[in-house]
Amino acid sequence: MKRLEKDESLCIGCRQCEEACSKAFYKVADSAKSCIRITDREDGTHGIAVCTQCGKCAEVCNTGVITADAKGVYRLNKKECAGCLMCVGFCPENVMVQCDDYLEPSKCTACGLCVKACPTGAIRIVEE
Amino acid sequence: MKLNNRPYADWHEGLTIRGVMEHMNFTWPKLVVKVNGQLIWPEDYDKVVLNEDDDLKIHHLLGGG
Amino acid sequence: MIRMCDLPRYADADMEEIKKMKEAHEVLNQVTYDPTPLHRGYTDKRLKIDVTDNSVSIIDIPQEVKEKFTGGKGYCLRYLWDATNPDTKWNSPENAITMSAGPIAGITQYGGTGKCLVCTISPMTDIPIDSNVGGYFGPFLKFSGFDVIELTGKAKEDVIIVIDGNKGTISIEKAPLEHKDAHILGEELTAMYAEDENDRKNVAVVCSGSAAEHCNLSMLNFTFYDPKRNVVRLKQAGRGGIGRVFADKHIKALVCHFRGVKANLNDVYDIKIINKDGLKFHREVATQDDKQNSMRKSGTAYSIRTLSDYDILPTHNYKYGGTDKVDEMAPEVWREKWLTQGGADGCWYGCSMACAKTADHFLLKTGPYKGHRVCVDGPEYESAAGLGPNCGITDPQVILELNFYCDTYGIDTISYGTMTAFLMECYENGILNKERTGGLELVWGNAEADLEMLHQMARNEGFGKIAALGAHKQKLYFAEQGWGDPAFLNDIAMEQKGLEYSEYGCKESLAQQGGYGLTNKGPQHDEAWLIFMDQVNNQIPTFEDKAEALYYYPMFRTWFGLLGLCKLPWNDIVPADNSLTDEPAKVPEHVDNYLDLYYGVTGTKIDRDDMIRMSERVYNFQRIFNIRLGKGLRKNDAIPYRSQGPVTEEEYLSRQERYDRQLVDLVGYTREEVEKMTLKEKMAATRRHRESEYEKLIDAVYPKRGWTLNGVPTVAHLKELGMDLPELLEIVEPLQDVQP
């Protein structure tokens, strides 16, 4: 199973990951369009929300257009997606992207672009 | 004490909101509870002790459309 | 627990058989058309098909109709009126079946937005019936270019009508070989018109079942294909015998194929609003449903046990309000043992409430499909209560079997449950006996006899022929035969206007007696459900309060049917802070969501008063439609005494303390007087009081609704609503001064 793993203690809140993610598909640097979400805590540390490939999105989809690939990464078939947004609303990590310019949401494919962008190694790809 | 604008006959010292609910067999899952107009959240049903002159409202919200 | 992820998929249909069936079709007429794309929720087109001559017409919907009738039920009633005349009966060729989804229907982002409304002149009530149904047909019809479809005429042999919204074709075909029962016919037609497995979700079927040819209680099934289970699911336009009219027209099925469902096929005014509210709604369900009604886990059946606690669950033909055997069908029993958990059980895209639960691979023990393992859609609360405790049955196995056969035969579970409860009470009282029922021992809780009666109804045999009449015609028939005292039959037959009651006991809620009695189509709770507000919360103690509730709620709830919406997402989930609002029962934030959705789709801003006004136009139109057909007056709003108070001695005695106390508190007797009264005297005094309370309620409600005391909409009210249409004035003007 392939997925992102995080170590929040290493995060410096630079948001390079968010930028890399949103640029990859949406071609803009916009944290609202990123499938990885950084939050600032009052104590100066940072929270990282990433897709854990838990599959909740696939479970709630009544069209069955979100399916796990051979590596356990849940992928959304946009062509068949009716854009109901249930997957976005039920995502336990709140890391699916809904953007009004597009009819379908998008989700983390564990592509690793955020990992490459992270200067401190706070996120990494694991394959188990 | 009054329950939903009707006299409540079974008041006793130490009666809690939960006590009223159990006595009345109020098992509906969606309730809005107010004591003298003050909203009480579910986590406080066991804690709030009712006085003899309290105005308790336990409103059931319908379901099913 | 049965989990979706462990569930074996259902088998595919036999494509060789399907091919043979299709080859046996004979095309009677096929037309091609250019599907009108939707703009802001409307196509402004009406599709009219007459199966007598197989003509197909596509007609513009005038702006005036749109303004006054909105869509959905409004359109259905408008075009039903136009198709019929004051002498039209349910089986007249000109009687139409109209179906319309409404302008919001077909968005995918918000829960409960795929509803289709269906109207016809009912074989049970002889006035218009309206039914609200899920499944994919309503939205697909819109995407295929039509705001409403109207079916008239009578075919000589069974036909199916196939609309392909991608190709732009409408075809009427003789279809002799397909099965009639819905769970098979739905599969056959889905497989037949899907290009491949992936295309099955793009086929929606409307059909009844084998009982529809002779059973007044027949409904229409609306399908949707469930890709996870690989099975066709059935939702029902249940009430009032629409299936009977469908079968009388020899329409075996209506099929709509549409590929390419997307979030903005309605070409909405502002998709941002819809996305925002939709997402907010899904998040609310995700975080609150487990704390509230657990709709995702048990569907509407969650309420069975708790309604028994409140003396509301109809038991033994509404004699009682609960049973101590209710734990046998408690929510956890359904969840743990019968209903598949973790499915995406919305009956349209985007319904995160997902209340359409199923019992999967359910092994049937009786009837023509004995030994088959099937998918049972349900049971919803109404089905479980009506088929269950109302008939003295609490075994989920039996309730599911009854539910399955009702669905596949095309029989309304609510009418069947209430009617069977009536028959059982007749049997228990000697009005029926083994001789009269052809051997069916219809005592409380006799599941075997109950199921056999249902199978006989489908086969049109034996006592099934009597059962197929429905409670209203049964009571007339029994009286005619000299079986039982007509007055007693009138008291215990839980029907009004010819329609059986839905499943709530309302003896202790006067407002709900009105909620059932003062309805347009007959006693269905979809106009008003006031039992908690009235009986438990004591929020509407005066006649004025009750009248206000019986004005506001029916109008508010009518709005859902105009727009193509389901009511459950309005109040089966509420925002976490709903308790803080001034009127939690109205769920104000959700009302605002609906105003947003309307604006987002149509581009027209409306407020809460406009909502009520939109409904009032259609509501009054329907009332006058009833008057046009000889009902719709005060006398037609009378209700059976079983819904008002204790008919029998055992009923009185079962709640004697309550009734005795009421004689003191409400009627004005002294305690001493009550102690000296005989049981018969107490029952008579209770009855006089309760019946007069109902009349007082009517006196308060009618003026609130803008009606005369005879129940006729006033000319002034119609003018105020902009509904002073000549065809309406012609009916109400002569009645303005007629006293009840």
Image (cartoon, coloured by chain):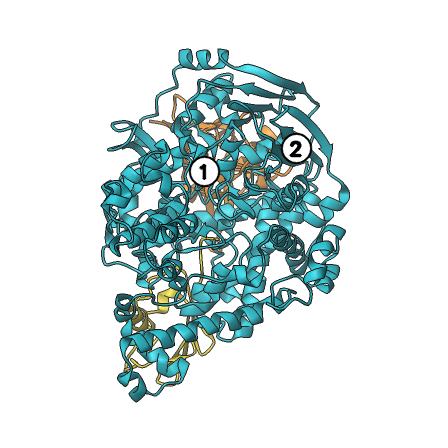
Chain colours: A orange, B yellow, C cyan
Quadrant (top left/top right/bottom left/bottom right) for the N terminus of chain B: bottom left
Mark 1 surroundings within 10 Å by alpha-carbon count, few (fewer than 14), some (14 through 19), many (20 or more) = many
Q: Is residue C212 left or right of residue C302?
A: right
Does the image show residue C45?
A: yes
Name the one closer to the observer, C571 or B48. Answer: C571
Residue C256 image point, x, y percent: 56, 27
- Helix, strand or loop status at disc 2: loop
Q: Amino acid at mark 1?
A: Lys
Mark 2 surroundings within 10 Å by alpha-carbon count, few (fewer than 14), some (14 through 19), many (20 or more) = many
Name the one closer to the observer, C682 or C291. Answer: C682
Q: Which residue is mark 1?
A: C235
Give the number of marks.
Answer: 2
Q: Is residue B17 left or right of residue C270?
A: left
Does the image show residue A107?
A: no
Which residue corresponds to the image point at 43% horizontal and 51% vertical from the top-left? C472
Disc number for residue C146: 2
In primary-sequence order, the first of circles 1 and 2 is 2
Residue C668 image point, x, y percent: 40, 85
Disc number for residue C389: none
Name the one closer to the observer, C479 or C420. Answer: C479
Q: Chain of mark 1?
A: C
Q: Amino acid at mark 2?
A: Phe
Residue C498 image point, x, y percent: 47, 51
Q: State if disc 2 and disc 1 touch (CB < 8 Å).
A: no
Q: Is residue C482 left or right of residue C246?
A: left
Residue C426 image point, x, y percent: 30, 53
